[in-house]
Image: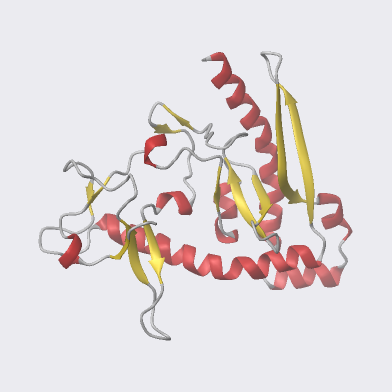
Amino acid sequence: MANHQTLTPEEHRDLRILTEPGVELGDGVMATLIIPEEFRRVQSEFPIVFRRTQEGETFVPLALFGFENGENLFLSDGRWQARYRPLSLAIQPFLIGAPTDEGSEGQVHINMDHPRISTSGEGVRVFDEDGGTTPYLEQIAGQLGELHVGYQGTAVFIEALERYELLEAFTLEVPLSDGSKQSLVGFHIIKEDRLQQLDSDALGDLHGQGFLLPIFMAVASLSHFSTLVERKDTALSNG
């Protein structure tokens, strides 16, 4: 079980975090959770897809990095090869903890078992020598706040997609240059023809809730499947 602790200057004065990209630091993932508020930023780099939760009762939106578990085609030679890094990766090893009192704000927690925790004296400080917050921690706190609000609103967004039948399962099979085929199954995407058929009342409802923009961003992001295929081909040719 992860070792989650409430972040405090008393307990974590000398804590340092390894911030560089790396498979061994938690970036070796096929996809990561995203929130509708960051769809515009995500769609400039990655396909946006949806996957059923393990319970099967709803969906979660994801930025897709590869075709197989553990494959991140945007990570190479210790470099993040994209202009945007989704929030759920950028905030690691931090998370929002439950508030201690009803009505109070959530607290910043940290997973002390995460590989980004530095044990060598290297990395970025979380607190300065006087126990004050560093610019790095202030940035993390802002990102955590955006994620926290976004996660709370994601369920309503997904409910709207399901209400208007805007999600459809898809399968992608792509021949690669080495003669093999790459398959992608188990995901859903925005059903574009259904979106075009919505009447003015439905579109007005989606617009009023602020959902039309992320929907259009999710549709636009699908052009990046060709980018994934190109990156997969390059990875195969480089051995």
Count how many numbered circles sit on residues in the image: 0
- Is residue 22 among what the camera can see? no
- Rendered position, 231 above or below 13: above
Whether residue 167 sits left or right of residue 47 in the image: it is right
Residue 166, position as x, y percentages in the image: 79, 58
Q: Quadrant of residue 58?
A: bottom right
Q: Quadrant of residue 198?
A: bottom right
Residue 1, position as x, y percentages in the image: 39, 57
- Residue in the image at 49% along x and 49% along y: 86
Q: Nearer the viewer, residue 45 or 93?
A: 93
Whether residue 2 sits left or right of residue 186 in the image: it is left
Q: Nearer the viewer, residue 37 or 18?
A: 18
Residue 201, position as x, y percentages in the image: 84, 72
Residue 169, position as x, y percentages in the image: 78, 48
- Residue in the image at 60% along x and 34% along y: 68
- Residue projecting furthest to the bottom: 102
Q: Nearer the viewer, residue 213 or 142?
A: 142
Q: Quadrant of residue 115?
A: top left
- Residue projecting furthest to the front: 1
- Rendered position, 80 above or below 40: above
- Residue in the image at 72% along x and 68% along y: 159
- Is residue 61 among what the camera can see? yes
Colour scheme in use: secondary structure
